[in-house]
Image: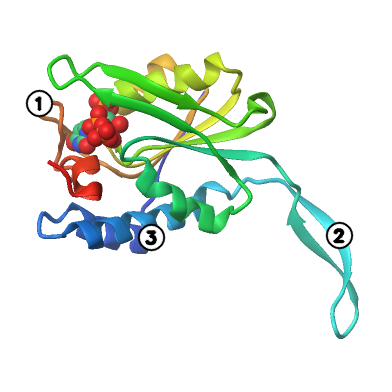
Amino acid sequence: MGKVYVFDHPLIQHKLTHIRDVQTGTKDFRELVDEVATLMAFEITRDLPMEEIDLKTPVSETKGKILSGKKLAIVPILRAGIGMVDGILKMIPAAKVGHVGLYRDPETLKPIEYYVKLPSDVEERDFILVDPMLATGGSAVEAINSLKKRGAKNIKFLCLVAAPEGVEEIKKEHDDVDIYIAALDEKLNEKGYIVPGLGDAGDRLFGTK
Ligand code: PRP
Ligand code: URA
């Protein structure tokens, strides 16, 4: 059964408040999303396996722990997920990066897939799927379908702001996927936007409208 983690770390919450603020421009928005992604990566890598090695410090022989080389892949959902990739790579620079391109049809709110490229050894990797927004959940569910169809078995979903509807949709369709959220918001509005949310994440990141 997948778990839902909502991060209440003060640094994450502080930065998220500025991300939400309509006065925050593209440059600051981008930098803040990058910083929050780094902080969230720190939290979601808590359970990475470790191994013990022998080493010498300048003073004595000792043992130390290192990551045991688990293969990871980060997969942003295009476009907005791109804004979180570099922040995560700062913590796990050896991870491979795949891409899933989806956009939400503005009328039906259904996701439309237009691009998929994943590392070739899909079955050996653990996946961190990233998108700042989890609204109806349609895009995340479709992206998870896409990863699973290609052989991915272990998938975590990481987002900044989620609506309860989106969390329920992932739990219903993919109850093996753990969900990591910076803030669980109140609801969706009639246009499928998260309330209070942060607006259109892709447009705010890339300065489009
Ligand atoms: C946004 C967001 C998610 C999706 C969430 O992308 O980045 O991918 O909407 O909505 P859902 O949970 O209801 O599917 P959008 O479709 O606006 O595409 P973009 O990133 O290219 O702007
Ligand atoms: N996509 C966004 O970018 N923002 C929302 O609030 C919902 C979907």
Question: Mark 2 sits on what residue?
Answer: 53
The residue lying at 24 percent from left, 48 percent from top is 206
- Give the crowd class for mark 3: few <14, some 14-19, many >=20 residues within 10 Å: many
Is 170 or 201 nearer to us in this picture? 201
Earlier sequence position, callout 2 versus callout 3: 3
Tag 3: residue type? Answer: Glu
Question: Are the two marked residues, 2 and 1, in contact with CB atoms closer than 8 angstroms?
Answer: no
**Looking at the picture, does residue 118 appear above or below residue 29?**
above
Is 145 or 160 nearer to us in this picture? 145
Question: Mark 3 sits on what residue?
Answer: 35
- Rendered location of residue 203, percent (x, y): 19, 43
Tag 2: residue type? Answer: Ile
Where's ligand 2: which quadrant?
Answer: top left
Q: Quadrant of the C terminus?
A: top left
- Does residue 35 appear to the left or right of 52 in the view shown? left
The residue lying at 19 percent from left, 48 percent from top is 204
> Could you say which disc has been placed on residue 76 in the image?
none
Question: Mark 1 sits on what residue?
Answer: 191
Question: Are the two marked residues, 2 and 3, in contact with CB atoms closer than 8 angstroms?
Answer: no
Q: Secondary structure at mark 3?
A: helix
**Looking at the picture, does residue 48 appear above or below residue 60?**
above
- Give the crowd class for mark 1: few <14, some 14-19, many >=20 residues within 10 Å: few
Earlier sequence position, callout 2 versus callout 1: 2
Q: Secondary structure at mark 2?
A: strand
- Which picture quadrant has residue 54? bottom right
**Looking at the picture, does residue 26 appear above or below residue 113?**
below
Instruction: Residue 10: tell me if it is visible.
Output: yes
Q: Secondary structure at mark 1?
A: loop
- Rendered location of residue 207, percent (x, y): 18, 49
- Which picture quadrant has residue 160? top left
The residue lying at 61 percent from left, 34 percent from top is 126
